[in-house]
Image (tube, rainbow, N blue to C red):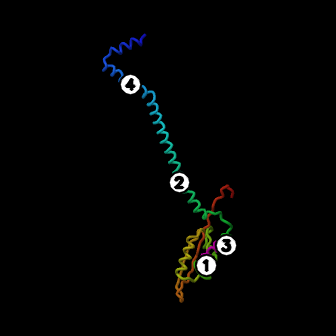
Amino acid sequence: MAAPALSSLWQRLPTSQQLLVRVGGSALVLWGLTVLTLRPLQQRLRVLKQEVGAAEARLLAAVAANEQAERVHKAFTQYRAYVKRPESAEVELAGFMTEVEQAAKEAGIAEPYLKPLKGPETAANVLSATIEAESSPAQLMAFLDKIQRSARLLRVKELTARVTEARSLRSSLVLDKLLLQVPDPSGAK
């Protein structure tokens, strides 16, 4: 019964007012749709953007940590040769003497005289040896380079060189090998 009354009321309205009511009703319907559908979607989108930002920050932190772990691992493997568990003093001395002889041969130094040093002049955590040889300056530099690059932590403690009558160098060196003590990871002594 209300429908016929509304229909007659609608027909009595001028066309401009009918248009105004239609536009107003459409705006009200659009506002209702916005409130009911778009605003919750906008809020959900805002929450999702925050979650993505937080996940991105965690990802960047994880990538940075992974890169740092890779750098640490690379450095550790690079220095692993220096931290081998020490063997007996005799084995260490034999390895030291062999490496010095090999370096001299590779540098082209013929017949070096090599002698281990023992006594009060050597420290407890150092092996020492003297080497005497005749070589050219280039051969001596090549030998010193091989000693410097050794993975056995070798160093030249003393170096004396003099020119011989044959225009070669007569060199005398004191070499040291540092002995590193690496603790046992199990804690046993």
Quarter of the picture holding the C terminus? bottom right
Cα–Cα span, label 2 and label 1: 42 Å
The tag earlier along the polypeptide, 2 or 1, is: 2
Indicate which disc, 4 or 2, sits on the residue closer to the N terminus: 4
Rendering coords of residue 41 (x, y %): 46, 33
Give the answer, above or below, for where 62 lies relative to 73. Answer: above
Element marked by disc 3 = helix
Q: Which residue is mark 4?
A: 26
C-alpha distance separating marks 3 and 4 = 98 Å
C-alpha separation, residue under disc 3 versus residue under disc 2: 40 Å
Q: Secondary structure at mark 2?
A: helix
User: Mark 4 packing: few (<14 Cα in 10 Å), some, or many (20+)?
Assistant: few
Circle 1 residue: 105
Residue 71 image offset from top left, x and y in percent: 54, 57
Question: Decide: marks 3, 4 in contact (CB < 8 A)?
Answer: no
Mark 1 Cα-neighbour bin, 10 Å: few <14, some 14–19, many ≥20: some
**90 is higher (above) or lower (below) than 61:** below
Q: Which residues are magenta?
A: 94-105
Type of amino acid under label 3: Ala
Instruction: Give the residue pinned by disc 2.
Output: 67
Identify residue type, mark 2: Glu
Residue drawn 35% across and 20% down?
21
Front residue (pair 96, 65): 65
